[in-house]
């Protein structure tokens, strides 16, 4: 398991470095308004992916070790086509009948980009999830790394060789990286087990029963994180949204630490039937995720404002305040990721659903109260409050179900030894 965490962590570190490079490039060459448009496009793609993941995502990972692989692929492919078709029709109708409201959600002329990215991304992520579900973490990491490298190399080409310095250069690069990722993900067919019977009807029923709750939970989670985008766009415009998007991406990029750890955690728990094992590794990995996130967050917090202004230009001078305001939420996100994968790995996604619904309620209340008064900082504070509320709920449910006391979450000597061991191997 440690080797899988190290391999995934290495991939996520590469992801973090590339994300940082992209944030710097967008900030310096495209500007805040272009960054705002990019943010709205990506949020729209994420919302479509929520519906795709009703028969995909974590549900697919969970059932890969339990169901016929061909059945899973047939169901997922068919569902992707249905969802994309419905969204295409829906967005076209929305644009025709309510053009003013439509422009608040989808930037002008970017419907095709949203649909194309959502389509390619859906098939790519389906293959990735099956690789994770069958435990081929190394193969997933390689494919994902190639995808990331193609993103940054394509973006550099469009900026400096094609000399395209508007937001379309990034969206074009993202599309290319998705295509590359899709081709790399085809390695999944090397590991597909055909099985005896397809039983697609049974698979659909069980995946919906499991995935419906799981994806509503995930939907609320994404809304908790990104509904502020629409409030900021409505109150302050695309330029302010671009500044907020940069600050959020920079700080929330640290969630990659928790994601890399929870990815392996979820794969291990979903394949195991031992609940005590699930509890033990959840506690240990939670400590590791929060500790690593805290260290990385501390580095961002001690950097002077002048450094941010130099790196991102004065157009993005509010980034440091956004990072400070969202810091508690970033730590909460790292814990939330581990808790969510614990409950989902045991086939109990309802806990995450209730947690994210609570977070959503806090998001709506505080977004209405704080964003009009405090602007971008108010949006960041809203996110921190929302993320923290979900973790508090998950903690008490975990305690009730397992009997684990607060003292068990406190670091002990062995935790630091394990941390030192993992860090040493990662650096080597």
Image: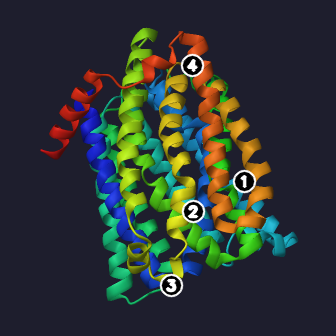
- How many neighbours does mark 2 have within 10 angstroms: few (below 14), some (14-19), or many (20 or more)? some
Closer to us: 29 or 390: 390
Q: Secondary structure at mark 1?
A: helix
Q: Mark 4: which secondary structure?
A: helix
Q: Which residue bears the numbered disc 4?
A: 398
Tell me which label, 1 or 2, sits earlier in the chain.
Answer: 2
**Circle 2 or circle 4, nearest the eye:** 4
Q: Residue, x 49% and y 53% (percent of image)?
A: 252
Judged by depth in the image, the label closer to the viewer, 4 or 1, is 4
Residue located 73% across and 63% down the image: 371
Earlier sequence position, callout 2 versus callout 4: 2
- SS at badge 2: helix
Residue bearing the label numbered 1: 86
Q: Residue at x 49, y 43 (%)?
A: 331
Q: 167 and 368: which one is in front?
A: 368
Q: CA distance from mark 4 to mark 3?
A: 47 Å
In the rendered image, which residue does mark 2 sit on? Answer: 42
Residue 79 image point, x, y percent: 61, 42
Q: Quadrant of the C terminus?
A: top left
Of all residues, the one furthest to the bottom in this rendering is 163
Q: Earlier in the sequence, mark 4 or mark 3?
A: 3
Alpha-carbon span between mark 2 and mark 4: 33 Å
Q: List the residue tagged with mark 3.
A: 166
Instruction: Tell me residue 98's x, y (percent).
Output: 86, 70
């Amino acid at each position: 398991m440690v080797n899988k965490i190290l391999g995934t962590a290495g991939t996520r570190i590469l992801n973090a470095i590339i994300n940082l490079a992209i944030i710097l490039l967008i900030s310096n060459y495209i500007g805040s308004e272009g960054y705002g448009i990019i943010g709205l496009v990506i949020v729209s793609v994420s919302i479509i992916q929520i519906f795709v993941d009703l028969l995909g995502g974590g549900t697919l990972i969970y059932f890969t070790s339990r169901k016929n692989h061909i059945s899973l692929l047939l169901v997922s492919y068919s569902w992707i086509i249905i969802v994309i078709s419905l969204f295409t029709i829906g967005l076209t109708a929305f644009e025709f009948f309510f053009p003013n409201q439509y422009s608040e959600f989808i930037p002008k002329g970017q419907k095709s980009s949203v649909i194309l990215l959502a389509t390619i991304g859906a098939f790519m992520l389906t293959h990735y999830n099956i690789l994770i579900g069958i435990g081929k973490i190394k193969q997933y990491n390689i494919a994902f790394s190639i995808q990331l490298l193609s993103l940054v190399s394509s973006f550099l080409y469009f900026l400096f060789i094609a000399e395209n310095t508007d937001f379309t250069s990034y969206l074009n690069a993202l599309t290319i990286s998705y295509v590359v990722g899709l081709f790399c993900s085809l390695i999944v067919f090397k590991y597909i087990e055909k099985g005896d019977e397809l039983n697609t009807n049974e698979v659909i029923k069980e995946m919906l029963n499991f995935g419906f709750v799981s994806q509503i939970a995930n939907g609320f989670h994404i809304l908790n994180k990104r509904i502020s985008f629409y409030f900021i766009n409505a109150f302050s415009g695309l330029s302010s949204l671009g500044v907020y998007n940069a600050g959020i991406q920079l700080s929330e990029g640290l969630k990659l630490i928790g994601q890399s750890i929870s990815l392996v955690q979820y794969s291990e728990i979903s394949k195991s039937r031992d609940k005590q094992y699930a509890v033990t590794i959840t506690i240990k990995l939670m400590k590791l995720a929060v500790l690593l996130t805290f260290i990385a967050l501390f580095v961002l917090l001690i950097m002077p404002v002048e450094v941010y202004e130099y790196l991102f230009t004065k157009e993005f001078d509010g980034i440091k305040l956004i990072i400070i305001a969202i810091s508690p939420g970033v730590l909460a996100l790292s814990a939330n990721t581990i808790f969510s994968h614990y409950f989902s790995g045991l086939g109990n996604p309802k806990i995450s659903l209730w947690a994210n619904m609570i977070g959503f309620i806090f998001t709506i209340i505080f977004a209405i109260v704080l964003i009009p008064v405090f602007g971008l900082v108010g949006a960041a504070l809203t996110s921190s409050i929302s993320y923290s509320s979900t973790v508090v709920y998950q903690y008490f449910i975990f305690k009730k179900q397992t009997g684990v006391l607060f003292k068990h979450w406190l670091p002990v000597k062995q935790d630091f030894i394990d941390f030192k061991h993992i860090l040493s191997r990662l650096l080597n």
